[in-house]
Amino acid sequence: MAKILLVDDEPSILSVLSVLLKAEGYDVVSADGGEKAADLIKSTSFDLMISDIRMHPIDGMTLLKMAREQRPAMSVLMITGYGSIETAVEALKLGAFDYITKPFKVDELLITVQRALDYNKALSENVDLKAQLTGRYKFENIIAESPAMRQVCEMVERVAPTDTTVLVYGESGTGKDLVAKAIHAYSNRKDKKFFPLNCAALPEPLFESELFGHMKGSFTGASTDKEGLFEAADGGTIFLDEIGSMPLSVQAKFLRVLQDKEIRRVGGNENISVDVRVLAATNSRLEDLIEKGVLREDLYYRLSVISIEVKPLRERQEDILPLVYHFLRQEIKGERELPSIEPGVLRVLEEYSWPGNVRELESAIKYVLTFAKDNVITKDCLPAKTMQAVKAGGIAASARYDDDIRGKSLRAFLRAKEQEHLEQVLKHLGGDKQKAAKELRISLATLYRKLPEPKD
């Protein structure tokens, strides 16, 4: 159901239009003047605003400008009893969809309203589509709009058909596991098993048994023979995440598997041939681990035959909005329409540094969906951590500027900035008003007039 804001300072016009549009099934909110409408535009999302031009103190043209700044996705129809070409052209130049002259015909009005809503829907779908499109590439949920991620996808295309060992590196939460899954999904082994293993999560005493299996009685608790991941994944792919956490005691045996394609179970005497592709990932510099003596250098060179780097999200800003819409669709799963996102929210999402990378962004989207009202995501829906970092990191400057100009006339805005400048000059001159007046090239009387009234 489309939501329409009606604005007119004539109660009779409001009443007639409200009854007429409600009868057509629209959700109608009425505002008896520009001031009330200005507050509604700030706080509520509408699909269409129908506003009279001649109102006081805030007229329709001012509302139109506010609407274009604060609700760019909302269509606007202007009503005028003074349907001059000049007024119509000015309204259209400012972004109005169309205008209606009084007295209006009901059929023509309803057709114009429907056209405006159809246009609004098409425009919204087009904007969303541009942000939602995942670019040229999409491998197993990899979003690739940025040059860095497109390069990753190109690498995946090239290495997937081979059996070469690949090392994926990048910060935590960047999606290294998705790259590994994509390599497997587009390889000749795609119909075989894919086994992921987080090396950091496995206790050292169990590591060798988990990878290579064990024989009954080979250690306390080994009550039966057990095959390891390499045997289970025969013909498929093993993905070893956090490879730098592999115990040094296991690395020599693992290196032999890479070289000879054979494993030997713990406590066993026979070598078992395995056909397994190994993919590995790390969020730390393996060269540093070599220097510390916790990683074999020969294993490093065997693992890093081909390396793929996944850049942190802060270095691929183009991916942020497509990821936002991807996670929204993923969470909503077709149950309802995607929520609209206020422009200020999009700015914050794009400029926040995302130290937790894609994983943090996904969590943030789950959070905002929980607190969104009327299917609209506002700044109030964002996690406190994100907003605190925004304010501390300087993004607040653009957001604060955006908040400063919303709903203010040019005169009020310039007045506020003028007072800020006066206060800064006075502070710099130690409060000396005579020096400040001279510095500002105004009279002392003018300075006193421009200063804000002292607070009680």
Image (cartoon, helix red, strand yellow):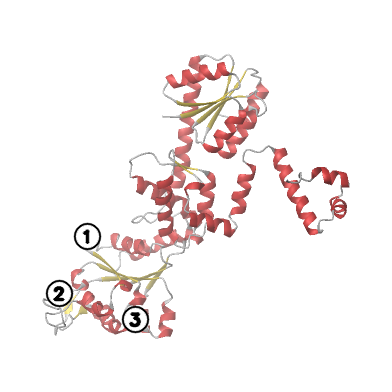
**Neighbour class for label 1 at 10 Å: few (<14), some, many (≥20)?**
few
Quarter of image, res 72: top right
**Mark 2 burial class by Cα count in 10 Å: few <14, some 14-19, many 20+:** some
Q: Nearer the viewer, residue 123 or 358?
A: 358
**x, y percentage for residue 411?**
72, 38
- The three-letter amino acid code for the residue at tag 1 is Asp
Among the 4 quarters of the image, the one containing residue 57: top right
- Residue 399 in percent (x, y) is at 59, 49
The amino acid at mark 2 is Lys
Which callout, 1 or 2, points at the residue further toward the start of the chain?
Answer: 1
Element class at badge 2? loop
> Label 2 to label 3, Cα distance in Å?
26 Å
Q: Quadrant of the C terminus?
A: top right
Q: What label does residue 226 carry, if any?
A: 2
Instruction: Name the one closer to the observer, 184 or 377.
Output: 377
Residue 318 rendering spot, x and y as whole percentages: 49, 54
Q: Are marks 1 and 2 in contact (CB under 8 Å)?
A: no
Q: Considering depth in this image, is 433 or 314 the residue closer to the camera?
A: 433
Q: Residue 299: which numbered mark, if any?
A: 3
Number of the label disc, if any, that sits on residue 191: 1
Q: Taking 93 as reference, is 185 above or below it?
A: below
Residue 146 visible from this viewpoint: yes
Query: Which of pointers 2 and 3 lies earlier in the amino acid sequence?
Result: 2
Residue 368 x %, y %: 43, 48
Q: Spatial distance from mark 3 to mark 1, Cα to Cα?
A: 28 Å
Q: Is residue 22 above or below residue 419?
A: above
Locate the N terminus by quadrant: top left
